Image (cartoon, rainbow, N blue to C red):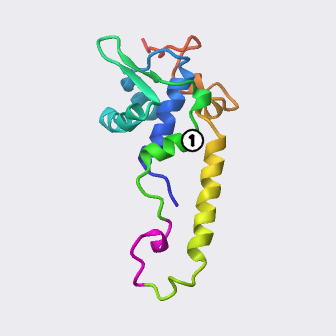
Amino acid sequence: MRLTKQTNYAFRILMYCAANGGELSRVADIAKAYTVSEPFLFKILQPLTEGGLLETVRGRNGGIRLARPAGEITLLDVIRLTEDNFSMAECFNEDVSGCPLVDMCRLSAALREALNAFFAVMAKYTIADLARPHGDIGVLLGLDSDGTAAVAV
């Protein structure tokens, strides 16, 4: 199984907001920190906002911030909002009529167990866990120590 690029950047957006200490984060600053396009990030914001993980503030001084504390947002919460399909093999699909082993094969049970183990691990970790790496994530993301985006002069 492989997570999509959208899920990867959803984690990154949430980590940025967590590192920003509750202040509003601008999508332009997030895009610059991760060297990715703003339209791509805006596409990812929609499910995160609709799912209650982010809140948006419109206007000239607007931006985004976590809608819940970072310690209450699990990685599984994010994955459920951003991933469409968890089929690891054709066995996971409804129509497996092409397989002669469908009634006796134990592969799908093994894959389902592996997927459930993956989900259990993702449920153990939160955005707060990701935003507390060995170094200062704020510095790496171009945030000043007070949580605001550093401006190059």
Residue 15 is situated, as x and y percent measured from the top left of the image, at 54, 31
Is residue 31 inside the magenta stretch?
A: no
Mark 1 lies on a secondary structure that is: helix
Residue sitting at the far front: 103
Q: Quadrant of the C terminus?
A: top left
Compared with 109, 82 (above or below) is above
Residue 26 is situated, as x and y percent measured from the top left of the image, at 39, 21
Is residue 90 inside the magenta stretch?
A: yes
| Image-based side of 3 in relation to 45, left or right | right
Relative to the observer, which residue lies in front, 56 or 51? 51
Query: How many residues crowd around disc 1 within 10 Å: few (fewer than 14), some, or many (20 or more)?
Result: many
Relative to the observer, which residue lies in front, 44 or 32? 44
Identify the residue shown where x is 67% and y is 28%: 135
The type of residue carrying mark 1 is Leu
Residue 53 is situated, as x and y percent measured from the top left of the image, at 47, 31
Identify the residue shown where x is 57% and y is 84%: 104
Relative to the observer, which residue lies in front, 85 or 42? 85
| Image-based side of 31 in relation to 148, left or right | left
Residue under pointer 1: 75
Residue 70 is situated, as x and y percent measured from the top left of the image, at 58, 27
Magenta residues? 88-98
| Rendering quarter of residue 63 | top left
| Rendering quarter of residue 99 | bottom left
Identify the residue shown where x is 38% and y is 38%: 47
Tell how many labels. 1
**Which SS does the magenta portion mostly show?**
loop
Residue sitting at the far bottom: 100
Identify the residue shown where x is 50% and y is 57%: 2
| Rendering quarter of residue 62 | top left
